Image: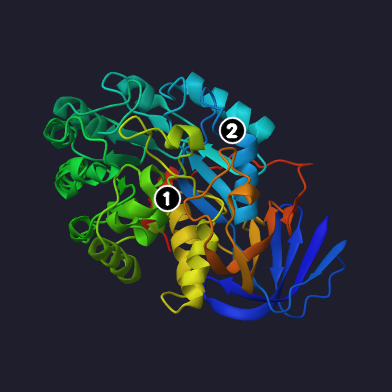
Amino acid sequence: MKTLIRNATVVLPEGTLPTSVLIDGGQIAAIDPAIHTQAETVVDAAGLHLIPGVIDDQVHFREPGLTHKEDLRHASRACAKGGVTTFLDMPNTTPNTTTQARLDEKLALAAERSLVNYGFYIGATPDNLDDLRRAQRTPGIKIFIGSSTGDLLVDDQDALERIFGETTLPLCAHCESETIIRANSQRYAGTQDVADHSRIRDHQAAVACTRRALDLAVRHQHRFHVLHVSTGAETQLVADHRGLITAEVCPHHLFFSVDDYPRLGTLAQMNPSLKTQQDGAQLWQALLDGRLQVVATDHAPHTLQEKQRPYPQSPSGVPAVENSLALMLNQANQGRCTIEQIVHWMCDAPARVWDIVGKGRIAVGYDADLVLVDMNKTAVIRNEEQQTKCGWSPWHGETLQGWPVRTWVRGHEVFRDGRFDESRGGAEAAYDHARGGYWRTA
């Protein structure tokens, strides 16, 4: 099957220009305004932007074991609606993804149930070094240096030295100091004020742990990606990349602050915690000047009933994969960034950080993971319209301008103007870790 997308404003690696894109099977076959090839489907995209599909490299889709709040089918539909064509899922499911066998089981589940492309990290524990050394079919290793579930906490220095020194896959980590969090928890013992969440998981907890992890990465010369940076101080730490260090920020840390606790309550509870408006401004600046390379969601859904428990019984995490692209496009419309920068942060950069083959760009020979975006469309985020199984968004009621309207996964249109085609699913992402990561690929 061939699909011709005509007259779009296409965001290409070399620049943005009006042209046409031909899809043949699952790949991009040609890019030329004068394509005359016959195609079974012709899409007139005049007035719309065509961008690569978003790669969200940090999600928690809860399957297996926690499917009352999210599952692969609902989450991948949310991805398709939001313009996300590939996700990389974290290992803190039940059971934790800490062996190749469990990784293979999740890949098999996604092959049956996911509407978009998928990948899964393997999780580090203090004693699964052999599994980490042998792991295959994965973008990399996730370490919880603080804020873990199950047996995933790795706070022991000797264990961390071995993981950084004796494995070869790219590493990423949740960086919050367990020691500082525990000391602060004692200080605020008995609190029921959710605003104290940001005092317990304070700036020092994030900064100290990120500094610790960066020291490990530099000493062992091991590629390392800092997840969900939440403080301005951390953006200074990751400024010296050493050809090894990349880092990312999440929409909730860009758009919310501690000032939102009175309005959102426990719906704004997340790990790392919300910080100040000044931190948010510094995160934006770091994104714009290249100290942060990736925007990802840390999509971490819980049911509303769970989230509305009194603090601290309420769980941390918010859903975001469905609205992340629209949130950023709205910022482009407001002049804070450009659509080209968004494509870099959400499409190209994560593909390069994780060595994902054939994705992240609109180029001949690349996978036809594509999104048509209407920069003039205005719509309101509503809980009742969310595809995520948890059925709510912390941005409920907000009006955004700039929305994905059509999504293709490997050449198959999976979403169009509110309707889904689930006749064909996504595919497992492929990795080429030998090519060397973000700083060594153009």
Three-letter code for the amino acid on which mark 1 is drawn:
Arg
Instruction: Measuring from the top left, give residue 275's x and y in whole percent.
Output: 25, 54
Q: Quadrant of residue 337?
A: bottom left
* Residue at horizontal 26 percent and vertical 22 percent from the top: 126
For residue 250, say whether it is visible.
Answer: no
**Which residue is labeled 1 in the image?**
435
* Residue at horizontal 56 percent and vertical 78 percent from the top: 16
266 or 28, nearer to the observer? 266
Left or right relative to 78: residue 24: right
Q: 10 Å neighbourhood of mark 1: few (<14), some, or many (≥20)?
A: few
112 or 94, nearer to the observer? 94
Q: Image height check: is 12 above or below 431?
A: below
Instruction: Measuring from the top left, give residue 8's x and y in whole percent.
Output: 69, 75
Instruction: Measuring from the top left, give residue 336's x and y in whole percent.
Output: 41, 75
**Which residue is labeled 2 in the image?**
71
Q: 10 Å neighbourhood of mark 2: few (<14), some, or many (≥20)?
A: many
State the SS at label 1: helix
How far separated are the C-alphas under marks 1 and 2? 33 Å
